[in-house]
Image: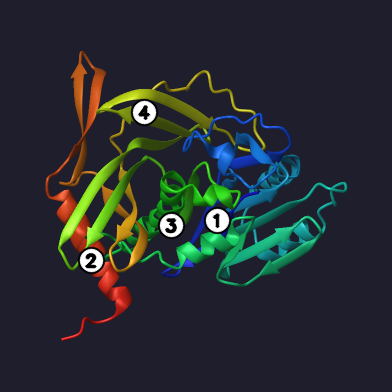
Amino acid sequence: MTVVACTRIRGVPLILGDILISQQGPDRSRSIPTRQDAASLLPPGYTVASVRRKLVVLSDRLAIAWAGHEVAARAVVADLRDVAREPNLERDRLFTFLDEYPHFRKRVSCQLVGWLVDGRGPLAFHWDSAGHVWAGREEYVIGSGAEDFKANAARRDVFYSDDVALTPDEQVTQIALILAGDAIGREMLSGEPLRHGYGGGMEVAVFAGGRFTVISDVCFLFWQAEMDVEEIDFRLAPVPTILKYLHVNDCLVVHTSRIERGEAVAQEVHVVTPVDREVEVSDFFPRFLSGQSAHYCNCFGGRVTGYGSVTGTMVMREPNRFIRFGQDVRDGKLEAEWLEVHSDFPALVYETLKTALNNQRGPASP
């Protein structure tokens, strides 16, 4: 159970994948970075087995994400790494390899979605271990959460506005983070993605500057909003969980801080490893990741009177005047860290949300 997707934003290829590995059977659930009650939200009969990276950047011009059985994915990804090392890999060679890939034993299967950028340009594709290859569409989304993800991704412009200070690649990076942030935000605030069998987190890679790059160094912040446009009433409250993403040695490291009364009462570090590699984490395993990040992904959920429930994501770069982490550093060691939110931040969210809702409803009546 999963969701993986390849799509194109403003002509730029990108690829996404969650990190949850589920299993059927007795509840022996392991913790995941997002929610502590994940097992109770999964479809009946399923529990959390582990977390694993499903997004794989195989080369500068080839990226995939896998779904299906972990044992099958491990073999396919390892073999594809060899193919990806070939100079000037073309689509005909890739599809010949996939067409001829040996079938797995019964009840074991794997699917891939991905992008190849070759001499003829970007090409999206979808492969399954039964021997089928599809190519040429703008988007492939597969897994148990495909319909839920697509339905919500269609609303991806809710919190997006063009920033003239951003390059085109930076704008696409922000939209990609909005897609990931929407899934992570809904998981944190309502648990809905877990009910469709995907979650734990979401990675995204973008083709920018001539290569696929996983977006890293991201801090996810979560907010509950209540809004009445007619009465000009707005309340914004932080959700007491902060996630920090950083990629190290081909692993995704997620630091989760759970906060009460302004202090972190529980901190967890999850090292999410690639499916085909045994990575020794002892040499780099961090006990703490600073909240200071290249990107701040603010995920919102709540209700708007006269409209209903609303979710959205607002991405900010470092530095910005609304969100920052203060630090107490002594003798080169970080002793303490705290989140600082500018007093104008709620007004910014209110105006952004109001504009987005007006755009969805159409022009206001005179």
The outermost residue toward the top is: 331
Q: To which residue does mark 3 refer?
A: 179
Say the numbered circle drawn on residue 354. 2
Which residue is at a point 28% across and 35% down the rendered structure image?
292
- Is residue 296 at least partly visible in the picture? no
Residue 32 bears which disc, if any?
Answer: none
Q: Distance between the residues labelled 3 and 1?
A: 22 Å
Q: Where is residue 163 in the image (x, y as percent from the top left)?
A: 23, 62
Q: Is residue 259 above or below residue 364?
A: above
Tag 1 or tag 2, which sits nearer the N-term?
A: 1
Q: Is any atom of residue 127 visible in this view? A: yes
Q: What element carries label 2?
A: helix
Which circle's residue, 3 or 1, is located before the other in the chain?
A: 1
Distance (Cα) linking label 4 and label 1: 30 Å
Q: Viewer-proximal residue, 315 or 258?
A: 258
Element assignment for label 4: loop
* Distance from Cα at disc 4 to Cα at disc 2: 34 Å
Mark sitting earlier along the chain (4/2)? 4
Query: Foreground mark, 4 or 2?
Result: 2
**Which structural element holds mark 1?**
loop
Q: Quadrant of the C terminus?
A: bottom left
Viewer-nearest of discs 3 and 1: 3
Q: Residues within 10 Å of mark 3 (few under 14, many from 20)?
A: many
**Type of the residue with mark 2:** Lys
Tell me, yes or no, whether the two marked residues, 2 and 3, touch with CB atoms within 8 Å: no
Say which of 122 and 291 sits in front. Answer: 291
Q: Position of residue 136 (x, y in %)?
A: 62, 72
Residue occupied by mark 1? 61
State which tag comes first along the sequence, 2 or 3.
Answer: 3
Residue position for label 4: 289
- Residues at marks 3 and 1 touching, judged by CB atoms closer than 8 Å: no
Residue positioned 15% across, 46% down in the render: 321
